[in-house]
Image (cartoon, rainbow, N blue to C red):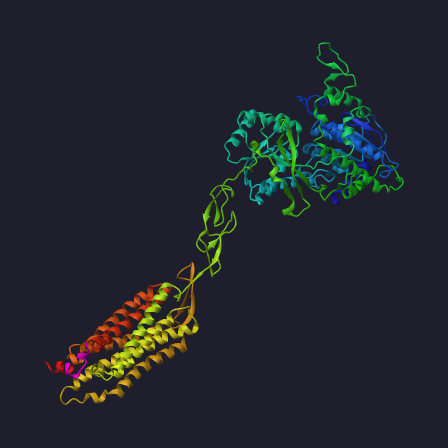
């Protein structure tokens, strides 16, 4: 508001200066007169392009240029004017709206020229009086508000000119987003949504159909450039890329048009967004057909998507299947009949009426030359008898916008004048006060449509989705296939009846226009170097990563206990691995362990059954029974390594293994020492056996075993084995294993076993050549050789084997060494006891001992 008040102060200063100098009012320039007019207490201005072009004159800048001569009469402007006239008539006949006050109108022709638009706008504001007056220039504006213009470029020029005077300009068709800038256009309002909303809606619709790679043609003016800029901004947010954005204007040379055509032909996108008007496309259609630019899916804006004349000119179906947004088609009761009664125009402007009548019916009221091929107008011609776009009401939404603009003025006047049974005054209101109240007006039309303006002077954005279809009679039809309402939440704004849409080349399949195919789940997008973000390669996710949506920009890492499936689109729980009783390896090892234990027990039973026989007595039966017991425990301790590791099983498996094997080796070591001592006892005078009798043998086994028990207890106290989830060996599965806790403890246990086994092997090796009576040393040597070989091989294999194979190898080592001891030490004796009982006597044993 501050700039407006500052401007008013400047105007008041100029007025005071003029009064002081006695300056009189005089009209500058040529007078401009309305095409249609009607007297009223309050005048509503109207500016429409009754002509669509003008004659270009060469300005020499030496003499005053002649007035602009307009050409190419446009019947649409007359329909807009009639909509204004209809609204004024309806308001004047209303007993509830502006009672006692009549509205009039003055409607001018802009000739679709900015200069003419500004000229006629000034005429509406200042008046047309050419005479010099002694009155000061302080009179109010001629009109309360102006309806128009249809085109953004002219509206911008007019709005900028009358803005300082706070005269409202209400446009029914100017959609340029730039006009929402109230700093530049403070008095501009409109009843058609801004291209800001239209561009967003078009972008959302394009994205809805999956078109991420599109081309665009824009009108090379404020309307096209501003609209395309808004579209591009939203398109980038929605992941849509423009392969090209080509400017075009109807004055472009043939060379520039060919450049546009070559750009389209060399492109890969199959969708063209046309931010142009119908006149632009009329020029381009023939060029497109000539260069075989057909089969493209066109996306249209309201400027051309419902234009019947353009549809008629599209003889080669270049635009067939086009889809776009247009202002909702709301019928205004009575307006259709009013427009078709052309004689109503005659009383408002006979000159323009004559022009239109002659244009519509191709006749002349006066024929000046007999050679002219024109018939005389009778005044009785019927619109129903001619084929003219004047009878086409496809632009009813724009007629309705004009209608709403007039009613917005009337409702604002009604509120300001305090109208009840009658209005308090019929004097014209202060422009600034009127403008501020006009911005806040809110009402419903007789059709139930709510009308109001936002802070930018724009209405709420609602559009119909229009699809170009061809009827059975080869006529173009504009079929409504959806709606867009900006007041709804983002995901609900666009509703479409997709099955009813007919696409380019009369197909029922949605066209595809992408730079790169969608990346399926399990992959991620990698933008191609030097190309837009819509051009990308699909890179498979790495192991342990997934993407479960299409066109994912990155792969997500699975959580620790999960891993990616083979398709890389889902995280699945990692498989847990441990040596279980259910799997084949576990079953086989269990069977072997149990068989070994039963064999050991069977041999124990045999030895117990024949404990009084010479062969059992000769080989130290007490240590043999203890050795068989310890071997049974060795076979059974291997079972603690099978199954899911737990806190107790981890501590038990290693300690039980260490203690039982030391007990076993201690017994073997005891037997070996006994063999050596027994040999020395046979030497005359030797008394060595009394130092290694049964009590000493038991004590030695207990002492050797106790040392291992102490090592295991210290290990369990300081850092015992514990269950551990190993995630490092295999990325795709979890290994459940027993962590050693203290590696020193484990290797101490294993090292102590190895020390005893080495000592036992050394002593047995020394006693291997003793007489046959003591030949058990040979078998102990073989057993220790197997034992040491197994455990020496075990160490590197154990360190390098992953997962459950580590456990399996450890069990295998236990079983192999246990079977080696069992078979080498006890199997030969069992063979003699069971199969050769005749040798199980003192004589064979003693006989061989005496032979030297």
Question: What percent of the width, then of the height, locates residue 680?
Answer: 17, 85
Picture layout, residue 311 above or below residue 612: above
Q: Is residue 674 magenta?
A: no
**Residue appearing at x 28%, y 74% in the figure:** 754
Residue at figure coordinates x 25%, y 87% from the top left: 694
The one nearer the camera, 601 or 151, is: 601
Q: Is residue 557 visible?
A: no
Point out residue 89 in the picture as x, y percentages from the top left corner: 82, 32
Magenta stretch, main secondary structure, is helix
Q: Over which residues does the magenta segment extend? A: 836-844
Q: Is residue 837 magenta?
A: yes
- Horizontal side of 577 relative to 178 (left or right) equals left
Give the answer, above or below, for where 554 lies relative to 412: below
| Residue 758 in sight in this render | yes
Above or below for 661 versus 685 = above
User: Observer-nearest residue: 141 or 92?
Assistant: 92
């Amino acid at each position: 508001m501050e700039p407006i008040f500052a401007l008013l102060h400047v105007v008041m200063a100029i007025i005071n200066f003029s009064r002081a100098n006695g300056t009189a009012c005089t009209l500058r320039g040529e007078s401009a007169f309305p095409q249609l007019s009607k007297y009223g207490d309050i005048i509503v201005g109207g500016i429409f392009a009754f002509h669509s072009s003008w004659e270009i004159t060469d300005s020499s800048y030496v003499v005053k240029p002649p007035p602009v001569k307009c050409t190419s009469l446009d019947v649409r402007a007359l329909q807009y004017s009639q909509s204004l006239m209809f609204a004024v008539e309806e308001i004047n006949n209303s007993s509830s709206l502006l009672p006692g006050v009549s509205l009039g109108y003055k409607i001018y022709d802009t000739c679709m020229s900015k200069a003419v638009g500004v000229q006629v706008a000034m005429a509406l504001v200042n008046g047309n009086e050419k005479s010099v007056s002694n009155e000061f220039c302080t009179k109010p504006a001629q009109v309360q508000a102006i309806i128009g213009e249809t085109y953004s470029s002219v509206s911008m020029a007019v709005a900028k000119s009358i803005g300082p005077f706070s005269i409202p300009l209400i446009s029914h068709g100017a959609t340029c987003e730039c006009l929402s800038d109230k700093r530049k256009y403070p008095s501009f309002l409109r009843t058609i949504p801004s291209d800001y909303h239209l561009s967003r809606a078009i972008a959302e619709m394009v994205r809805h159909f999956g078109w991420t790679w599109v081309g665009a043609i824009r009108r090379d003016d404020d309307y096209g450039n501003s609209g395309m800029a808004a579209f591009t901004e939203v398109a980038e947010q929605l992941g849509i890329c423009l392969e090209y954005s080509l400017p075009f204007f109807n004055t472009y040379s043939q060379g520039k048009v060919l450049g546009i055509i070559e750009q389209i032909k060399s492109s890969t996108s199959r969708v063209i967004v046309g931010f142009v008007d119908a006149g632009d496309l009329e020029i381009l259609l023939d060029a497109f057909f000539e260069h075989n630019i057909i089969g493209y899916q066109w996306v249209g804006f309201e400027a051309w998507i419902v234009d019947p004349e353009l549809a008629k000119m599209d003889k080669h179906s270049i635009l067939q299947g086009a889809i776009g947004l247009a202002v909702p088609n709301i019928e205004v009761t009575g307006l259709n009949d009013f427009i078709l009664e052309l004689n109503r125009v005659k009383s408002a402007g006979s000159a323009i009426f004559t022009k239109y009548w002659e244009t519509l019916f191709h006749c002349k009221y006066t024929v000046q030359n007999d050679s002219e091929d024109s018939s005389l107008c009778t005044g009785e011609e019927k619109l129903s008898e001619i084929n003219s776009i004047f009878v086409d009401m496809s632009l009813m939404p724009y007629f309705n916008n004009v209608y709403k603009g007039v009613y917005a003025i009337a409702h604002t006047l009604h509120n300001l004048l305090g109208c009840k049974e009658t209005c308090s005054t019929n004097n014209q209101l202060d422009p600034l006060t009127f403008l501020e109240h006009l911005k806040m007006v809110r009402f419903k039309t007789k059709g139930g449509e709510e009308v109001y303006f936002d802070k930018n002077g724009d209405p709420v954005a609602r559009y119909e989705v229009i699809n170009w279809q061809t009827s059975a009679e080869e006529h173009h039809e504009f079929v409504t296939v959806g709606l867009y309402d900006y007041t709804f939440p983002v995901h609900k704004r666009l509703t479409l009846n997709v099955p009813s849409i007919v696409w380019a080349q009369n197909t029922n399949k949605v066209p595809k226009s992408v730079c790169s195919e969608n990346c399926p789940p399990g992959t991620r997008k990698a933008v191609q170097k030097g190309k837009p973000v819509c051009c990308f390669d699909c890179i498979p996710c790495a192991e342990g990563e997934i993407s479960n949506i299409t066109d994912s920009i990155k792969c997500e890492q699975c959580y620790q206990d999960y891993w990616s499936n083979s398709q890389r689109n889902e995280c699945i729980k990692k498989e847990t691995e441990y040596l279980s009783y259910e799997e084949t390896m576990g079953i086989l090892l269990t069977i072997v362990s149990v068989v070994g234990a039963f064999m050991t027990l069977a041999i124990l039973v045999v030895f117990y059954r024949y404990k009084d026989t010479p062969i059992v007595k000769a080989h130290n039966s007490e240590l043999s029974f203890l050795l068989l017991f310890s071997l049974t425990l060795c076979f059974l301790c291997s079972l603690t390594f099978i199954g899911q590791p737990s806190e107790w099983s981890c501590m038990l498996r290693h300690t039980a293994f260490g203690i039982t094997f030391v007990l076993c080796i201690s017994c073997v070591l005891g037997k070996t020492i006994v063999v050596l001592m027994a040999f020395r006892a046979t030497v005359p005078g030797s008394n060595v056996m009394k130092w290694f009798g049964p009590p000493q043998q038991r004590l030695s086994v207990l002492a050797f075993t106790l040392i291992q028990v102490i090592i295991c207890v210290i290990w369990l106290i300081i850092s015992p084995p514990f269950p551990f989830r190993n995630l490092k060996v295999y990325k795709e599965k979890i290994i459940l294993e027993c962590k050693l806790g203290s590696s020193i403890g484990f290797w101490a246990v294993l090292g102590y076993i190895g020390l005893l086994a080495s000592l036992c092997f050394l002593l047995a090796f020394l006693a291997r050549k003793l007489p046959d009576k003591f030949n058990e040393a040979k078998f102990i040597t073989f057993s220790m050789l197997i034992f040491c070989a197994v455990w020496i091989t075990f160490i590197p294999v154990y360190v390098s084997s992953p997962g459950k194979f580590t456990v399996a190898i450890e069990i295998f080592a236990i079983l192999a060494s246990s079977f080696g001891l069992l078979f080498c030490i006890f199997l030969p004796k069992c063979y003699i006891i069971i199969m050769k009982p005749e040798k199980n006597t003192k004589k064979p044993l003693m006989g061989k001992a005496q032979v030297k």
